[in-house]
Image: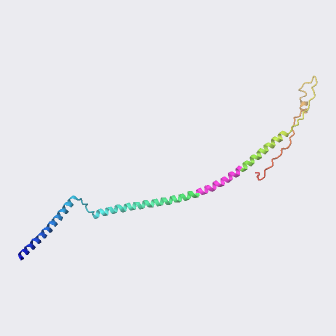
Amino acid sequence: MTLRLALRRIVVTAGVAASLVLGAASIRAAAVWTASNAALEQPVSVQALANDLAVQQARSADLAARLEAVSSQTTDISAALATANQQVQADGKTADTLRARLAAAQKKLATLTRQIAAATKALRTTTARRTVTVVKKVQPATRAGHSDDEHDDDRDDHKETPEPKETPEPKPTPEPGDSQP
């Protein structure tokens, strides 16, 4: 029995060793088959990484410069906006002052228009009441045999031009609150 037992042990040990070799061979074959079907990327070299880093640093510096320019423009625009707001406020105050002056001028114009209308009415009334008195001298009839040329001097002495008599015009009275210039 001992021979059988020893033989059995040798056969089992050989089977286990064969299965281990067969397993290792199948693993090796699967690895080769997978490697041939899969495209592997080449590893990146240090030089390529350095070049990419330099490109990204240049891009970062460019973006930082652009950001600084935008920041400067924003500051300039803010200053211009503040100046424009101050100008708008000053223009608003000027507009308010001009509106007040316009209202005062319109009020004064209305007052002057009323005064002109009153003065025109008073002038028409005065003109209608005014009477003109004309003094006219009658010349003596010319004598026969005397020419009119001889008496031209006499006629000039006796002629009088009519003089109208005028009554003084009343002055319009200013309305309360009006200032005379």
Q: Nearer the viewer, residue 44 or 145?
A: 44
Please check the rendered image and state whether residue 78 is part of the magenta-colored stretch, yes or no: no
In this rendering, the answer to whether 110 lies above or below 164 is below
| Magenta span dominant secondary structure | helix
Stretch in magenta: 87-106
Task: In the displayed orientation, state which residue is furthest to the front.
Answer: 1
Residue 56, how many percent across, how many down?
A: 35, 61
Residue 149, how many percent across, how many down?
A: 88, 26
Please check the rendered image and state whether residue 88 is part of the magenta-colored stretch, yes or no: yes
Residue drawn where x is 76% and y is 46% of the image: 114
Asked where in the image residue 19 lies, by quadrant, the reply is bottom left
Q: Nearer the viewer, residue 89 or 133?
A: 89
Left or right relative to 65: residue 50: left
Left or right relative to 50: residue 61: right
Left or right relative to 109: residue 136: right
Instruction: Quarter of the image for the N terminus: give it.
Output: bottom left
Residue 47, how many percent across, how many down?
A: 29, 63
